[in-house]
Image: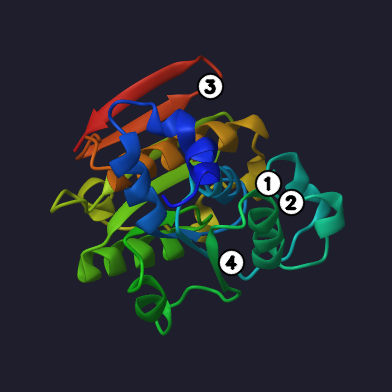
Amino acid sequence: MKKADDFSRYSRQIFIEEIGLEGQKKIIASKVLVIGAGGLGSPVIQYLTAAGVGTLGVADFDHVELHNLNRQIIHTENSIGISKVKSAENFVKKLNHQVRFMAFEEKINELNIEDILSYYDIIIDGSDNFSTRYLVNDTCVKLKKTLVYGSILGFSGQVAVFNHKGSKNLRDIFPEPPFDEVVPDCDSLGVLGALPGIIGSMMALQTLKIITDLPVNLDQMTLVDTMNWRFQIVGF
């Protein structure tokens, strides 16, 4: 925190007793990887950029399409046809030039995942398929990386923190992934645009709490039902 402008920019976070100047310094020094720049990744990228995360990596191999725009709020009509990672980079640079953006325009797979994840302190999984989710989970366990997990469908979502300081991981609650082709997804059943904003914001908040050494719920999954406005915590 060297300049008065920095203090002014983050002052509303610094004024929080549990964050303070030291907490903001931790945020600025942190290195976070977001897997997926879609519905969940968009609000995560937005709020971590605004909070001043020092290094923000984003991995996505897809391109922006018109149907993305109801929920993937960092992309615009002008982004259609370009890569989601490039669109995300444009957004981050406009919002906060101090954030170091690292782009991975490639699909996460068994060959590249360890190289990509190894540099980061916290991994955020906003992917949309079970094969990637389990690959990310298992690699975080292997590399001893904290994983912030979220998923969405229709009016419902899930949030959890896995593998943080030895806590449980995805396989402890769901030992084996289902087959992707038999699982309903947003492409077939849809998702209300504001839902990923809710779940993604929760993921971003958990990430900031982890960075600043504040307590987070471990060995628990939060289930969000926005149709009936119910929030349930399930231990595992």
SS assignment at label 3: loop
Q: Residue furthest left?
A: 166
Report, in whole angstroms, how far the alpha carbon at label 2 lies from the one at label 3: 24 Å
Report, in whole angstroms, how far the alpha carbon at label 3 lies from the one at label 4: 27 Å
Indicate the amino acid at tag 3.
Answer: Thr
Residue marked by disc 1: 72
Residue marked by disc 3: 226
Indicate the amino acid at tag 2.
Answer: His
Does the image show residue 30? Answer: no
Indicate the amino acid at tag 1.
Answer: Gln
Q: Are marks 1 and 2 in contact (CB under 8 Å)?
A: yes
- Of tags 1 and 3, the one toward the viewer is 1
SS assignment at label 4: loop
Residue marked by disc 4: 60
SS assignment at label 2: loop
Q: Are marks 3 and 4 in contact (CB under 8 Å)?
A: no
- Of tags 2 and 3, the one toward the viewer is 2
Classify 10 Å Cα crowding around label 4: few (below 14), some (14-19), many (20 and above). Answer: many
Residue 145, by quadrant, is bottom left
Report, in whole angstroms, how far the alpha carbon at label 4 lies from the one at label 1: 13 Å
Q: Are marks 4 and 1 in contact (CB under 8 Å)?
A: no
Label annotation for residue 84: none
Classify 10 Å Cα crowding around label 3: few (below 14), some (14-19), many (20 and above). Answer: some
Looking at the picture, tell me which residue is in the foreground, 64 or 134: 64
Report, in whole angstroms, how far the alpha carbon at label 1 lies from the one at label 3: 18 Å
Mark sitting earlier along the chain (4/1)? 4
User: Quick check: 74 left or right of 205?
Assistant: right
